[in-house]
Amino acid sequence: MKIKRLDPGDARPYFTCGDNDLDEFYSRDSILSANQLLSVSYGVLDETESLVAYFSVSNDAISRDHMPNSRFHRLFNTIPLEKRYSTLPAVKIGRLGVSERAQCNKLGTNILDFLKVWFTHKNKTGCRFIVVDAYNNPRTINFYEKNGFKFLVDGNKNDSTRIMYFDLIPFINFVIESQSIKK
């Protein structure tokens, strides 16, 4: 697999993941978002250079206003006092689509694993969390939960999307521990 940045001027070959909103974002809105500096999209290419998935990312933050004080303080208290901010830096997965022909092959999980490593290896943007507005359906929620994401708030159970987050510190600590065990 190869990951390629999709710049606004790049051609968008046919792609369908079976979700009209995700397909439209890839073919049209990803260009508009990139031109407005709102997100950057990446294509995942197979060995034949065919697009099998894409994702978009943008800067975000977890704000105290997004969650109950107790949950924010649990996240906040893991950060040394002298480094605390009013918001906690995050990267947002704006869209993630896997082509219909490549679904059910762990490609979505591999993309999330890539993002976890990408944003912790040499800390490219200074983000602590990965967040996503996950479609509020059992398949999507289950996918993100299986990949270690948790709900940011409990009060949006009936919304069309639910904000979920992944804390990168336990992940990076796990990677470091795993590497030291191998030595």
Image (tube, rainbow, N blue to C red):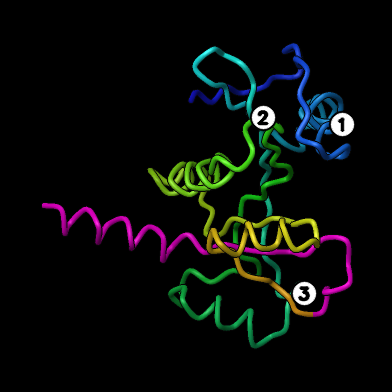
Question: Are discs 3 and 2 less than 8 Å apart at CB?
Answer: no
* CA neighbours of label 2 inside 10 A, class few (<14), some (14 to 19), many (20+): few
Q: Position of residue 72 (x, y in %)?
A: 63, 79
Q: Residues within 10 Å of mark 1 (few under 14, many from 20)?
A: few
Is 165 left or right of 174, judged from the image as shown?
right
Q: Nearer the viewer, mark 3 or mark 2?
A: 2
Label 1, on which residue? Answer: 24
**Residue at 87% over, 40% down:** 21
Q: Residue 101: which disc?
A: 2
Classify mark 1: helix, strand or loop. helix
- Check disc 3 and give the amino acid type: Asp
Q: Where is mark 3, residue-wise?
A: 65
> Disc 1 to disc 2, how far (Cα)?
18 Å
Instruction: State yes or no: discs 1 and 2 in contact (Cβ < 8 Å).
Output: no
CA gap, disc 1 to disc 3?
Answer: 31 Å
> In this rendering, would 64 be left or right of 180?
right
Q: Where is residue 169 in the image (x, y as percent from the top left)?
A: 43, 63
SS class of the residue under badge 2? helix
Number of residue marks: 3
At x 55%, y 76%, the residue is 75
Quadrant of the rendered image containing residue 157: bottom right
As drawn, is 44 to the left or to the right of 17? left
At a point 69% along the width and 31% down the height, the residue shown is 99
> Type of residue at label 2?
Arg
Please report the bounds of the magenta region as a residue range: 155-183
